[in-house]
Image: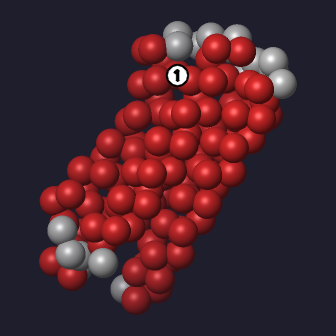
Amino acid sequence: MSVVILIHTNLSNTIWLFFLALGLWGIWRAARGQGVDGSYLGALVIGEILYIVQGVLGGILWLNGLLPNVGRPTMHILYGSFALVFMPFVYFVWLKGDDSRQAQWVLSFTTLFLFGIALRAVGTAV
């Protein structure tokens, strides 16, 4: 089980760094007048997959009774659950698949918000 804890911990660092890079890349693209393209959408999908893997690992830890070791377990689960559903919500419900420059701005700030959520989730785990 210590391997799962190690992967869960290190993947959390990967996630916040990845979403910071995605947010900065998205702002760079939007500032240059570019819309959402396949490369950016692919990176968003990879980010969502990272969050899904993180959630599965967290679920394994929870089922094995290791969640009480987390500082604020309820908030930790809330941040993780929110991170799983926020990006698909923004893309499918709010933007409805739009790929304009405005959508690039929205997705850029969405990824920066998810960067903050990842940092808060890490903060509640300590």
Residue 69 location in percent, x, y? 21, 82
Q: Amino acid at mark 1?
A: Tyr
User: Which residue is found at the position 59% from the left and 28% from the top?
Assistant: 107
User: Which residue is found at the position 74% from the left and 25% from the top?
Assistant: 30
Q: Is residue 63 visible?
A: no
Identify residue for label 1. 91
Q: Is residue 36 left or right of residue 125?
A: right
Q: Nearer the viewer, residue 98 or 54?
A: 98
Q: Is residue 125 left or right of residue 115?
A: left
User: Which residue is found at the position 23% from the left and 76% from the top?
Assistant: 70
Q: Relative to residue 101, is residue 46 depicted above or below?
A: below
- Looking at the rendered image, the quarter that the N terminus falls into is bottom left
Helix, strand or loop under label 1: helix
Label 1: how many residues lie within 10 Å, few (<14), some (14-19) or many (20+)?
some
Q: Is residue 64 left or right of residue 94?
A: left
Residue 102 location in percent, x, y? 64, 14
Q: Is residue 75 visible?
A: yes
Q: Relative to residue 32, is residue 77 depicted above or below?
A: below
User: Which residue is found at the position 76% from the left and 18% from the top?
Assistant: 35
Quadrant of residue 17 within the rendered picture: bottom right
